[in-house]
Image: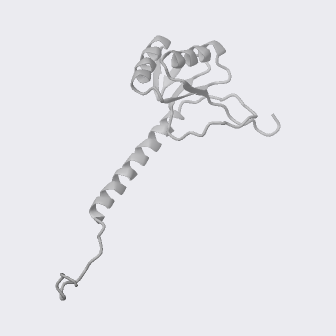
């Protein structure tokens, strides 16, 4: 026995398209800005040391990029930092986001000591996911 009226049409569930369009727009804006920030990290000219091995880690999110030029100048993003200021910023980052990745792009002509100091600053700040960026050697090198 059915209690529904015979003249009433049944409709299936509907998807609210306006909400989906809003979400797609927000995702588009997010990825556009994220890709723009990643490009600014790469604008500081450095010649990365060559490495035969592949990177073993898979990057699931964009890391914090610290760049060290051949003269020892340290950048985070596109802003220059002194080592003590960088330690302070990394310490705050480690307190707020302990799982954050740090990628160190050190010029092959820079002093190893500066690179080790930056790596030590990341580890001291509680950021255990720090790595050195390298490039593949060119054929014939």
Give percent across and percent down for residue 56. Answer: 66, 36
Quadrant of the rendered image containing residue 106: top right
94 vs 69, left or right, is left
5 vs 132, left or right, is left
Q: Residue furthest front?
A: 1
23 vs 123, left or right, is left
43 vs 124: above or below: below
Residue 117 visible somewhere in the drawing: yes
Give percent across and percent down for residue 36. Answer: 45, 42
Quadrant showing the C terminus: top right
Quadrant showing the N terminus: bottom left
Residue at x 62% of width, y 20% of height = 70
Depth check, front residue: 9 or 97: 9
Residue at x 49% of width, y 19% of height = 126
Residue at x 18% of width, y 88% of height = 7
Residue 73 visible somewhere in the drawing: no
Give percent across and percent down for residue 79. Answer: 44, 25
């Amino acid at each position: 026995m059915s209690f529904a009226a015979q003249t009433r049409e049944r409709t299936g569930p509907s998807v609210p398209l306006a909400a989906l369009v809003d979400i797609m727009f927000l995702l588009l804006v997010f990825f556009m800005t994220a890709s723009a920030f990643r490009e600014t990290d790469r604008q500081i000219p450095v010649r990365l040391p060559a490495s035969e091995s592949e990177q073993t880690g898979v990057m699931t999110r964009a890391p914090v990029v610290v760049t060290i030029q051949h003269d020892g100048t340290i950048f985070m993003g596109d802003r220059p930092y002194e080592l003590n200021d960088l330690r302070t910023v990394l310490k705050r980052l480690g307190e707020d986001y302990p799982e954050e990745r740090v990628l160190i792009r050190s010029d092959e002509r820079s002093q190893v000591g500066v690179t080790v100091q930056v790596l030590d600053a990341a580890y001291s700040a509680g950021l255990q996911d720090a790595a050195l960026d390298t490039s593949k050697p060119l054929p014939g090198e």
